[in-house]
Image (tube, rainbow, N blue to C red):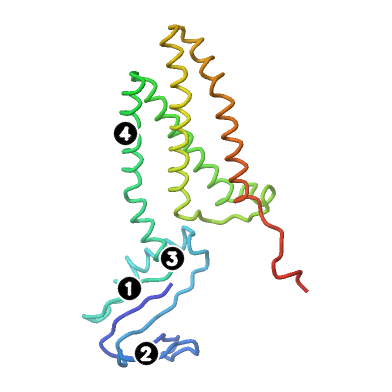
Amino acid sequence: MCGTGELDGGTAGPVARGGGRPPWGAPPRPGLGPGRYARVIVVARHVYGADSTRALVRRLRDRLIPSARFPAGVRVEVGGVPAQGVDYLARAYGAFPWLVLGALVLTYVVLLRGFRSLVLPLKAAILNLVSLGAAFGIIVFIFQQGHGSGAILSVPATQSIIPWIPLMIFAFLFGLSMDYEVFMVSRMRETWDESGDNERAVAHGLERTGRIVTAAAAIMVAAFSGFVIPSTSTPCGPAS
């Protein structure tokens, strides 16, 4: 993390303990003039996406910097990858619950109009939420917390999940589940309109769509397996 401050006076560049400039401190950039900017680099103990690192960013912004009592006119900002991650999470996931709610409401209205049933759209929405929560829980349990990731996939615990992955999972999972839902229930509805027999409609609908859905799922599993199977090749050659 980097803290950049715009100063009225003093020494530009990083300041080490004791007031001296460390050897890695860069001099002031040309054109800015001396005494305008200073940069302090703070290295966290954990990975940039860990909860403790995000808590450090919030503590810097909310407590430590305001309590430092910088002179009037000094602007202090917290940057770097951890701070960018906190800002991204706040912006992307601030509206995420409303996005999920909007998708559920729109799905319910469309299925209500298509199937003329109050129960089927509600069941589809509830099952989608359950499957979405299960997917998120498995990812956190295995990859973030590391329960079995090393033994199964030879991947250590990540301590965090890349922020865009839950958004991608929601888009894929919700879209595909609703696609298959409409595909299967449509066949059942056609049979029920012809015969009026509920058991026959369910059995016939599953019979006509089961193989197609299973084949599509197998293709997706094979395609996405390339993202989870670790690579054992060494492009640079064996280590000496």
Residue 40 location in percent, x, y? 41, 80
Q: Which residue is the site of mark 4?
A: 106
Secondary structure of residue under mark 1: strand
Mark 4 to mark 3 CA distance (whole Å) = 35 Å
Kindly indicate the quadrant of the structure image that contains residue 112: top left
Whether pointer 2 and pointer 4 mark residues with C-beta atoms closer than 8 Å, the reply is no
* Foreground residue among 183 and 10: 183
Disc 1 vs disc 4: which is toward the camera?
4
Secondary structure of residue under mark 4: helix
* Foreground residue among 187 and 71: 187
Mark 2 to mark 4 CA distance (whole Å) = 55 Å
The disc label shown at residue 82, or none:
3
In screen coordinates, is 202 left or right of 236? left
* Foreground residue among 113 and 19: 113
Secondary structure of residue under mark 2: loop
Vertical relation: 32 (above or below) 172: below
Disc 4 vs disc 3: which is toward the camera?
4
Q: Amino acid at mark 3?
A: Pro
Q: Amino acid at mark 2?
A: Pro
Task: Name the N-terminal-most of marks 1 and 4.
Answer: 1
Task: Name the N-terminal-most of marks 2 and 4.
Answer: 2
